[in-house]
Amino acid sequence: MLRKFASYYGPHKKLFILDMVCAFLIAAIDLVFPMVTRRITDQIIPNGELRSLYIIAAIMLGLFVVRAMLNYIVDYWGHVVGTRMEYDMRGDLFSHLQTLPFSYFDKNRTGHIMSRMVNDLREISELAHHGPEDLFLSIVMLIGSFILMANINLGLTLIVFAFIPLMLFFALKKRKKMTNAFREVRKKIANVNSQLENSISGIRVSKSFTNEEYEMDKFAEGNTEFRVSREFAFKTMAEFFTGMNFLSNLLNLVVITAGGIFLFNKLITIGDLLAYLLFVNLFMQPIRRLTQFTQQFQSGMTGFERFIEILNIKPDIEDSPNAKGLEEVKGNIKFNHVTFSYDEEETVLSEINLQVDHGKTLALVGPSGGGKSTLCHLIPRFYEVSSGNITIDGMDIRDITMKSLRKNIGFVQQDVFLFTGTIEENILYGRPDATEKEVVEAAKNANIHDFILTLPDGYKTYIGEKGIRLSGGQKQRISIARVFLKNPPILILDEATSALDNETEIKIQKALEELSKGRTTIVIAHRLSTIKNADQIVVLTDKGIIENGNHNELLENDGLYSKLYKSQFKGYMPDEVA
Ligand code: ADP
């Protein structure tokens, strides 16, 4: 895992090395200062070498200017390395997410994926930048000062260093408590945020049920938990800093007392004692850095492991090595003994045999949960058949490149999704290289052009979060325009179950009829007119295909279809039947 982590430094190697070298030089300059002070106190002043004092002061000034520059490089370019690594990882993660199959998104909620993209990567970035620098700087500082101090007096140095494990132990313990407490605070604020979002989105429902008080109570609970967790986090923070300050004073006291005794016994000089005091104060920084590093390492590596876990998920549906593109598609679709299940437990489709000829329309009807959507999702390979096969013009869809397969299939979903952006951009999603004229043509075919012209910015009108709101019927027609522009030979339609007003309904119906012309169409049908006009009707239930034929044949058959037709049809094929 560490090696994998290190590999992300690869492209930024030069910057990283620069960062480390500068960090090393900073530590070296910091270590020089106590030694210089010692020399001034013990030699230069007693010998009255005022000239040397000025020279040393001038040299130190130069070193401090260099240190300031090094500091700037570490602070700025060090963060740049972290940011660039995070950028690379985020790009990798996003590209990988695009390749993952539907089944991954079925199992993982959006919020969960977002948290991977945002929180984990931020923790990793912090570790990437501060981790090596903190570790390296602290070790250089501690070893460097130990050597220099031991050179002055080994006994006193050992007394001082005996204190360090105690400080590290305290700092690690308290820091861990503090990190956990602040993690808890982040969880609680996330709860408050999601509760807030939920409540505001559902404000119409709570008002209509006059449940405002219930909502307030629920919110107060989360809000209180957040406050309590925050107060506790500040308590741990106060404990950490108070303790560290006390220990640092204690260390100074140890140095001045033990040092005083050593000085009294003429084992060290005044300059030595002064240098010790300065060294001791330099220690505090590496101790803080080391404790920070252990925490950062923990959370950064946990985030990185989760990041790698996602990157390691293989797309289970991929192009086979000899996959070909489709050419001059006619659109004959055939299901041969198709069986499918989402998981081991339940078989959703079993032994499905079906044929739709070029340019014909097949209506799928049947009770909810019968497998109509599932069957449709198998054709563009959103999910892979468990056994049997599906062919297009005689070619197994697994031997067709996914790109070519999906280019030749248009999908009109029941729940239309439009991206935040302009209407034009949304239609262009069907074929990004289309001309403006073609976009207008598609919109006209979808019966939405006239409406678009009434909008303030026409095709450039912004829709989505900060833009205008469209009705369900308008969204539907934009999504139909998208498919017109794509112009695929095969069409899959999921007819809306919700009733629209008559005029909208006619507009959509007309657009869909126009869209189906000359294309092989499979429609999950709810409207009687759609069903009656279909060339073929398939009744699909959890027992498989129980009827297959045209309207008249199925009526004669006197089975489920005819029962539904006689008892229930009032323009819609009800969902809950059978
Ligand atoms: P229909 O479109 O006829 O209403 P579906 O194809 O949506 O039927 O559902 C068929 C069965 O498959 C149902 O039992 C449903 O719970 C299950 N199912 C649908 N989608 C998924 C999914 N993404 N993961 C697991 N099971 C699913």
Image: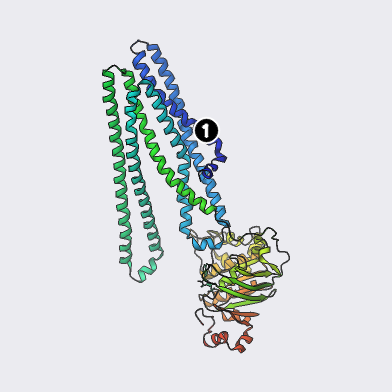
**As drawn, is 489 to the left or to the right of 165?**
right
Foreground residue among 29 and 345? 345
The image quadrant that residue 53 belongs to is: top left
Residue at 42% x, 27% y is 144
Q: What residue is pinned by disc 1?
A: 18
- Residue 159 visible, this angle: yes
The type of residue carrying mark 1 is Leu
**As drawn, is 5 to the left or to the right of 247?**
right
Foreground residue among 484 and 334? 334
**As drawn, is 210 to the left or to the right of 107?**
left
- Residue 529 lies, in percent from the top left, at 59, 81
- Residue 67 lies, in percent from the top left, at 45, 27
- Residue 540 lies, in percent from the top left, at 57, 78
- Number of numbered callouts drawn: 1
- Residue 443 visible, this angle: no
Foreground residue among 418 and 312? 312
The image quadrant that residue 192 belongs to is: bottom left
